[in-house]
């Protein structure tokens, strides 16, 4: 009788482990693709996600379908398919690993192919810089994080991050330990 109970318990543990492994694989897959559902073919990608914003034709004969979520989302799904339309890979172009691939001297097209459609562009006339930004997963002290790529003469010169804080100040509900700038003492405010 004890043997049967041990076998039943062993099966339950085995099923729990299998369920946890399946859940972990699903979470890892979602993390890699930014939460988008994995697809097997170009036709399925279009059926699930709609027409891509852009189709990139790669030197090796493959195509990459771009699905950006800018300006408010922080994912750009890139689905690469072979000549027959089978999916080779799906990835979030705005993953931290991919952001680290931006190098000094890259062109606008190279950056766009790597990260997808940007959120906005800002031109700084005095420095001659053109800055593209993408809303990315928040990794900072603010409520939003923008990844910035700085170009001069059409080439990358550097990257940076911008942290956006709420309108009521950086204290973020008073829990971050950063206190807002104190109000002026009454005796310094002129009475009118």
Image (cartoon, rainbow, N blue to C red):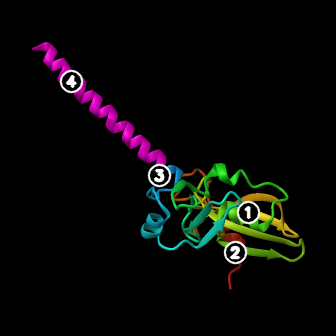
The answer for how far apart the CA atoms under marks 2 and 4 are is 75 Å
Image quadrant for the N terminus? top left
SS at circle 1: helix
Rendered location of residue 10, percent (x, y): 24, 23
- Left or right of 44? Residue 163 is right
Q: Tell me, for residue 189, which label it has, or none.
A: 2
N-terminal-most mark, 3 or 1: 3
The answer to which of 160 and 66 lies nearer the viewer is 66
| Circle 3 residue | 30
SS at circle 4: helix
Is residue 14 magenta-colored? yes
Q: Tell me, for residue 9, which label it has, or none.
A: 4
Rendered location of residue 112, percent (x, y): 70, 66
Which residue in the rendered view is the most extreme toward the left?
Answer: 1
N-terminal-most mark, 2 or 4: 4
Rendered location of residue 94, percent (x, y): 62, 58
SS at circle 3: helix
N-terminal-most mark, 3 or 2: 3
The magenta region covers 1-29
Q: Tell me, for residue 80, which label it has, or none.
A: none
- Left or right of 94? Residue 27 is left
Which residue in the rendered view is the most extreme toward the bottom?
Answer: 192
| Circle 1 residue | 111
The answer to which of 1 and 126 lies nearer the viewer is 1
């Amino acid at each position: 009788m004890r043997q049967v109970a041990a076998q039943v318990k062993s099966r339950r543990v085995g099923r729990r482990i299998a369920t946890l492994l399946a859940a972990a694989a699903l979470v890892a897959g979602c993390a890699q693709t930014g939460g988008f559902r994995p697809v097997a073919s170009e036709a399925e990608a279009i059926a699930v996600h709609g027409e891509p914003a852009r189709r990139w034709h790669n030197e090796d004969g493959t195509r990459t379908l771009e699905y950006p979520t800018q300006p408010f989302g922080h994912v750009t799904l890139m689905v690469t398919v072979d000549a027959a339309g089978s999916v080779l890979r799906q990835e979030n172009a705005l993953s931290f690993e991919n952001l680290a691939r931006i190098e000094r001297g890259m062109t606008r097209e190279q950056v766009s192919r790597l990260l997808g459609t940007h959120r906005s562009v800002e031109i700084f006339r005095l420095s001659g810089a053109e800055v593209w930004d993408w809303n990315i997963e928040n990794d900072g002290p603010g409520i939003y994080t923008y990844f910035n790529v700085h170009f001069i003469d059409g080439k990358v010169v550097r990257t940076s991050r911008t942290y956006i804080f709420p309108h009521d100040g950086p204290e973020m509900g008073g829990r971050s330990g950063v206190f807002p700038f104190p109000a002026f003492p009454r005796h310094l405010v002129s009475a009118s």
